Amino acid sequence: MSLTLSSVWSRSINNSDPMIKMALMKKTPIYVSSEKVENNSNYLAVIPVVSESHVKAMLLIKKMPFMAFNKDNLISISIIIAYFLEEIEKGGLISSLPYSALVDDDFYFELQRLEKIYSEFEVNSTILIIKTPDELYAHRIDEFIQENLRSLDMVTRHTMHDLKVIGMLFPFADQASAKGFLTRLFKLLKLDTEDEKIEFSLFDISELQIAKEYAGIKSNDA
């Protein structure tokens, strides 16, 4: 398999290649099977990496095993590249986001990044929000979360009208994964889901605005 990730200004790129020209113009992945591309390209696929409406780099695929050359794999490659490119540019992107007094910068950046990936690729992520007025409950829950976070999972917390609000983000995970985490939390901490001292809800990343309202975050906060 031959994969190359190149800057759009790299001298090694032949900008006259029909697939590269089409990818730069449309800012979307172009494949050798595309009817709109002349069949004399050097590549099987050209996947542009787009950030802030600009093509920052391109993944050029010259060779790839036939069974691996499918839409799902190519979309997965596009998502991974887009995700990590924004990580590289994170500092500048965070500085351009509106200030939030209730959500830390890293968590808010991740929310916006995953919402963008959902809008472009329809890949879901899940938000879990837990609220409790009990300081001890909040402390125990927070301890469990810190000990059981996956590498990409994130947590944030704030206080709203005497309620301790804990927000969790499960990147690229559906609600079934978050429900499994929640079940383990309640079981290990011996908490009752019917306990009036604890309230929780799950949201898809497409429901981000509703999740913010549930967490008590106003539009001018985040």
Image (cartoon, grey):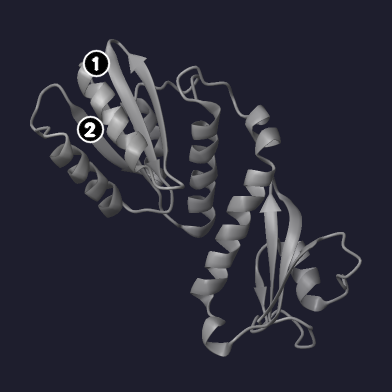
| Label pair 2/1, CB-CB below 8 angstroms | no
Question: CA separation, marks 2 and 1?
Answer: 16 Å
Given residues 120 and 162, the one toward you in this image is 162
**Left/right of residue 123 with respect to residue 85 in the rendered view:** left
Instruction: Kindly give the residue lying farthest to the top in the view shown.
Output: 162
- Within 10 Å of disc 1 (Cα), the crowding (few <14, some 14-19, many 20+) is few
Q: Give the total of numbered labels.
A: 2
Given residues 1 and 52, the one toward you in this image is 1
For image coordinates 33% across by 42% down, the residue present is: 148
For image coordinates 29% across by 52% down, the residue present is: 177
Position of residue 211 measured from the top left corner of the image (x, y, whole percent): 35, 33
State whether residue 43 is above or below residue 198.
below
Label 2 vs label 1, nearer the camera: 1
State whether residue 94 is above or below residue 34.
above
**Left/right of residue 5 with respect to residue 190 in the rendered view:** right
Helix, strand or loop under label 1: helix
Position of residue 141 measured from the top left corner of the image (x, y, whole percent): 26, 30
Q: Which of the labelled discs sits on residue 200, or is there none? A: 2
Q: Earlier in the sequence, mark 2 or mark 1?
A: 1
Position of residue 47 measured from the top left corner of the image (x, y, whole percent): 68, 67
Residue type (three-letter) at the residue carrying disc 2: Phe
- Within 10 Å of disc 2 (Cα), the crowding (few <14, some 14-19, many 20+) is some
